[in-house]
Amino acid sequence: MSESGWNTIDSDAGLFTELVEKLGVENIEINDLYSIDSDTLQALKPVYGIIFLFKYGKLDREYAKMNKPITGEYDSGNEIFFANQTIQDACATQAVLNILFNQNEIELGKELNDFKSFVTGFDSEMIGETISNSELIRSIHNSFSTPNLLAIDNKPPPKNQDDKNDGLFHFVGYIYKNNCIYELDGLKQYPIRHCSCSDQDEFIAKIPQVIQQRISKYDSSELRFSLLAITDNKLEKARLDNNEIEVSQQLNKRELWRRENELRRTDYTGLIVELLKNISKEKTDSEWEEMLQRGRSKTQQTIAESLYKQ
């Protein structure tokens, strides 16, 4: 694991929830969205922002060359907190921070409030550099990365690549502020304005169309998208409502999140190597090859079934 750079982290609701809590943000959690529609978002109100994860590919590079957003239009004049992305693997945390720093009703906590005050007046590139150089933010971000003996420091943001070699994913945020829906993409020059929006209900009504319009620009075979919603803390809300059933469900969800986050921090390399040694030592070469082939077939079947369900 890198001690000085930024490491890749998963797109996961429990991970991001614990991450923002460790940064000192109060009464916030992040939930997976399995569909993007108004009814789903209404059930999660209040929704402070949406995080959109997608495969950064040919279309994105083409618009980047033209210095244009894929949908919407640049807005350089509104009072939006916006940080450019200067380190590739920081984009997940940066997308979250871009949303949180634009919400006046969220209690950021002392550390992030001090940080926001410090960078006020900086341009977007300098804010991005300051985030990338924050030891606090980087160390908490990296605490959720899977141990990797081959981690590479300071990888640049996505550049021009052949599609076949492009394995990069990118996070952007969507918020409503100053009577508009904005897209906050750290790889873009400015915030991107999409449409008018006056309140929470209108945001919930319009944001599905904004995101669907973006998705429609990609090839129809592209299925690698993920969505997360930044909301209030549902456990605390259930406790305030004296809803014992909901409290129990939320406690179970958070216990699952806790276990998954602990597993992410564990390096299983040694265990896997020893298991393979024990399995293979009594096998002939042909038996070993046959077992590997069964494993490959099972993996391909699992992937095919997963894609069919989507």
Image (cartoon, grey):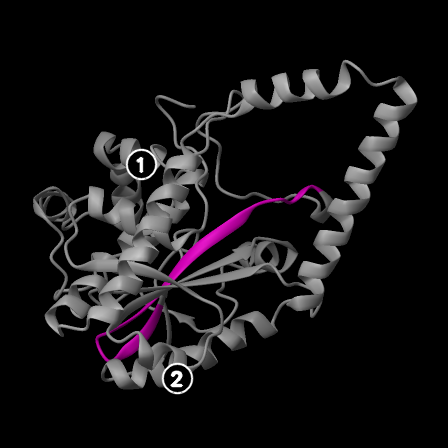
Q: Which mark is residue 201?
A: none
Q: Is residue 184 visible?
A: no
Going 32% across and 49% down the picture, which residue do you hit?
Answer: 255
Name the residue type under label 1: Ser
**C-alpha gap between disc 2 and disc 1:** 37 Å
Q: Which mark is residue 132?
A: 1
Going 44% across and 78% down the picture, which residue do you hit?
Answer: 208
Q: Which residues are magenta?
A: 165-182
Q: In this image, 255 relative to 219: left or right?
A: left
Camera-side residue: 159 or 23? 23
Name the residue type under label 2: Asp
Up/down of 278 relative to 260, above or below: above
Mark 2 / mark 1, whichever is N-terminal:
2
Going 81% across and 45% down the picture, which residue do you hit?
Answer: 297
Up/down of 43 relative to 156, above or below: below
SS for tag 2?
A: helix
The residue that mark 2 highlights is 39
SS for tag 1?
A: helix
Image quarter for residue 261?
Answer: top left
Camera-side residue: 164 or 24? 24
User: Majority secondary structure of the magenta segment?
Assistant: strand
Q: Is residue 176 part of the magenta span, yes or no?
A: yes
